Amino acid sequence: AAGLFRRALMASGWCTIESDPGVFSELITELGVKGVQVHELWSLDKESMAEVGPVHGLIFLFRWRGEKDDRATVTPGPGVFFASQMIPNACATQAILSVLMNCPSISLGEEMTAFKAFTKDFPPDVKGLAISNSDLLRRVHNSFARAEPTVSEERRASKEEDEVYHFISYVPVDGKLYELDGLKAGPICLGDASPGEAWLDAVTPAIQARIEQYSSREIRFNLMAVTADRRERLLAEQAVIEKERNMTVGKVQARAGKLPSPAELERLAASHPEPPATGEVAVDERTLEQLLIALAHLTARAAKVAADIENEQQRVGQWKIENIRRRHNYAPFIVNFLKVLAERGELGPLVEQAKKKQRHGAR
């Protein structure tokens, strides 16, 4: 362990990364984990939680002040992955791992599955050292650093007044709800965690209490949910809808010879309640009118799910564009652009014009 600790100190070049769902989602994907997304939450109400789909865990960002916390920690059981944070700036990736490693239903991929097995019996401090010394984790984490061509993260002087932000996780494990903070000696057990999504009811007061603890001095918080990939859920829902719709279309054509127009289907959906989903046998038992009403609602649902899938594809595409821009170093372009302006004799007048605007704006 001593050798690992020395290596961690020597290789402690972990940068700070932005608290952004697009960054976290792509980071998880690049670790080889499948079927997981991160969504930003603007509210703690049930509707907001339900909108993002099945929630594996929550990640909370707050300004760290080093204040005393008298809450008791517990010794992590065999089913709880808890790692001490051994180096600065790694808390974002560590908070993500705290959710991923504690959710058995997540497909971790080859690398992360091997890492979990390798560190399974390590104490928290050695788990933290293993994270610090993982080339994959450090490389993927640092790939989301903003380009800083003039000052490197390692050479930047740390000032006492610098704002320090910290990530922690909330996750249900083996029927208990835990707060996992790598700066603490162990997990904090917040009580029982009901099966399914009910654990979110228990975590809401804990997060609200932490926010209220700082509310008089601090308003900068960020809460993100680690969830199942909405695209996979929507595609599965689309397959079920299309199967029943195609079955219903066949029955309507067999009895009526033709299908209603889109306008007629919209009218039927608006004027009749949606019937319950059914199987092939029950479809045969429906009257023609019931089949037409079911077809109208299935067509409307299919259109909505298709639109939701398109929105998700656009969201993920926008995340990729934003991450490319985050990583790109624009300094060479800017320097060359200024050189061209100077060679044309246009830089000086533009600088003077900017100074004049600045003086007028200050008045």
Image (tube, rainbow, N blue to C red):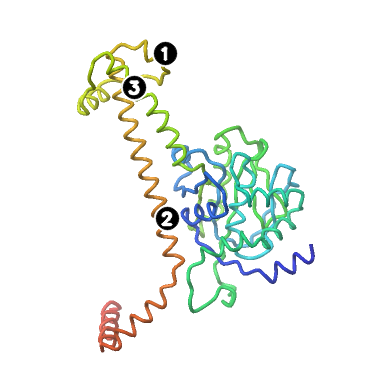
Q: SS at mark 3?
A: loop
**Front position in the image: 47 or 114:** 114
Please determine whether, in this image, residue 3 is positioned above or below residue 191. below
Q: SS at mark 2?
A: helix
77 on left or right of 283: right
Of badges 2 and 1, nearer the viewer stands: 1
For the residue marked with disc 1, what is the amino acid? Answer: Val
Residue at x 65%, y 40% (from the top left corner): 173
What number is the disc on residue 319? 2
76 on left or right of 360: right
Q: Earlier in the sequence, mark 2 or mark 3?
A: 3
Of badges 2 and 3, nearer the viewer stands: 2
Residue to which mark 1 is pinned: 281
Q: Are marks 2 and 3 in contact (CB under 8 Å)?
A: no
Counting labels gives 3
Instruction: Return the x and y of residue 169 as percentages of the image width and height.
Output: 60, 50
**Front position in the image: 258 or 139:** 258
- Quadrant assignment for the C terminus: bottom left
Residue at x 45%, y 34% (from the top left corner): 236
Marks 2 and 1, how far apart in space? 44 Å
Marks 2 and 3, how far apart in space? 36 Å
For the residue marked with disc 3, what is the amino acid? Answer: Glu
Q: Earlier in the sequence, mark 2 or mark 1?
A: 1
What number is the disc on residue 360? none
Instruction: Return the x and y of residue 238 as percentages of the image width and height.
Output: 40, 33
Instruction: Return the x and y of residue 11 as percentages of the image width and height.
Output: 67, 69
Residue 66 visible? The answer is: yes
Residue to which mark 3 is pinned: 274
